[in-house]
Amino acid sequence: EKKSLARLLGEPDPACRTREGDAHPFDRAALERLASVLNRDEAEKLRLPLTLIVSGDSEDSAYLTDELGAKALRAIEKFDRAFPFRDGRMALPHSLAVDLVRRHGGALQLAFA
């Protein structure tokens, strides 16, 4: 289950459910960081958690296909011109993807394709 950033910010204990039915909690500070770089409409549109896809095609990279999520991550992480969103994805080194998942309090997850 994915929820909008705006909805999660309105919950006392922000969380969604995994496919298995378990709680997937979000760190409020991580949600507030995302909200700080988006306008209200964007916060309604952004669905969390964002999924970084690790593909067998490319062993050392992961990619994000959510353009709004990529915009928010680029702003928070101050990527400047690094890791542009093009051709429907933002590609990242695998090590950076793992670090981002660790630091963003449930707002990002890895999926293996």
Image (spheres, grey):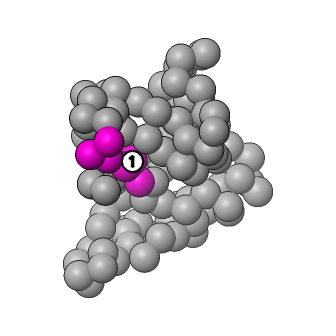
The answer to which of 7 and 107 lies nearer the viewer is 107
Extreme residue toward the bottom, this view = 21
Location of residue 25 in the rendering, given as x and y in whole percent from the top left corner: 31, 64
Location of residue 83 in the rendering, given as x and y in whole percent from the top left corner: 52, 24
Q: Is residue 25 above or below residue 78?
A: below
The magenta stretch is: 51-57
Which residue is label 1 attached to?
52
Q: Is residue 100 above or below residue 45?
A: above
Q: Residue at x 43, y 41 (%)?
A: 63
In the image, taking residue 13 as reference, residue 11 lies left or right, namely right
Q: Residue at x 57, y 50 (%)?
A: 66
Q: Is residue 93 above or below residue 50?
A: above
Q: Is residue 43 above or below residue 82?
A: below
In the image, taking residue 50 as reference, residue 53 lies left or right, namely left
In the image, taking residue 26 as reference, residue 91 lies left or right, namely right
Location of residue 34 in the rendering, given as x and y in whole percent from the top left corner: 54, 43
Location of residue 1 in the rendering, given as x and y in whole percent from the top left corner: 43, 76
The answer to which of 37 and 96 lies nearer the viewer is 96
Residue 19 in view in this figure:
yes
Q: Residue at x 31, y 56 (%)?
A: 113
Residue 27 in view in this figure:
no
Look at the image and say whether residue 55 sits in the magenta stretch: yes
| Amino acid at circle 1 | Leu
Q: Residue at x 26, y 46 (%)?
A: 56
